[in-house]
């Protein structure tokens, strides 16, 4: 899929994520970011993985867990829309999801394994979508969006958080 979604294909809230995605085939971009994220985070020692750059901020492990959970949710949205399901989908509260975990007790290697599995599942889903499926639209959190837009939102969301990780956690 080489054509970026138009602004009419997603809620304006996601514009900052979509803008971060480089030009090119979204499948290739997500494949490359999988490699890049694993390269960056596989060298983080356990003590550093629990680091929080400020009070009330998530640890590095929690950020990775959030990236993974968010991709699960956004891929589910993409799947439902791509398959033609017109049932409106709800939003979610990222803080509630993260507060329900014990990620700081989980080894970083396990979190990276989980992230990798989720990304690979996303990639296999995308590989099987027809052109028609990419352009289908559905309702998420009271806003119309296309399946294609969710692939870009997934990518941009990860890019956003990896930029924060590099700036605030690994500098």
Image (spheres, grey):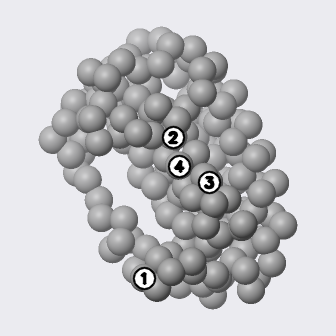
Please tell me the numbered disc located at residue 162: 3
Look at the numbered disc 3 and give the secondary structure of its residue: helix
Q: Which residue in the structure is indicated by mark 4?
A: 160
Percent of width and height locating residue 104: 60, 84
Query: Do the residues under discs 4 and 2 have CB atoms within 8 angstroms?
Result: yes
Q: Seen in the image, is 83 located left or right of residue 34?
A: left
Residue 71 in sight: yes
Could you say which disc has been placed on residue 56 in the image? 1
Q: Secondary structure at mark 2?
A: helix
| Residue 140, image x, y percentages | 24, 41
Q: Residues within 10 Å of mark 3 (few under 14, many from 20)?
A: many
- Of pointers 1 and 4, the one earlier in the residue sequence: 1
Query: In screen coordinates, is 22 left or right of 16?
Result: right
Instruction: Point out residue 33 in the picture as x, y percentages from the top left corner.
Output: 69, 42
Q: Which residue is mark 2?
A: 156
Quadrant placement of the N terminus: top right
Residues at marks 4 and 2, CA–CA distance in whole angstroms: 6 Å
Q: CA distance from mark 3 to mark 2?
A: 10 Å
């Amino acid at each position: 899929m080489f054509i970026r979604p138009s602004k009419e294909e997603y809620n304006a809230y996601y514009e900052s994520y979509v803008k971060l995605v480089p030009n090119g085939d979204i499948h290739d971009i997500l494949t490359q970011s999988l490699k890049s994220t694993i390269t960056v985070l596989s060298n983080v020692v356990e003590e550093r993985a629990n680091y929080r750059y400020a009070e009330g901020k998530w640890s590095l492990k929690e950020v990775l867990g959030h990236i993974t959970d968010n991709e699960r949710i956004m891929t589910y949205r993409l799947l439902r829309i791509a398959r033609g399901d017109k049932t409106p989908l709800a939003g979610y509260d990222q803080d509630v999801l993260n507060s329900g975990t014990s990620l700081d007790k989980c080894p970083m290697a396990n979190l990276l394994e989980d992230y990798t599995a989720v990304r690979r599942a996303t990639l296999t889903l995308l590989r099987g979508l027809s052109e028609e499926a990419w352009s289908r639209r559905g309702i998420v959190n009271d806003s119309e969006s296309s399946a294609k837009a969710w692939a870009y939102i997934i990518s941009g969301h990860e890019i956003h958080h990896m930029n924060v990780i590099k700036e605030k956690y690994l500098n």
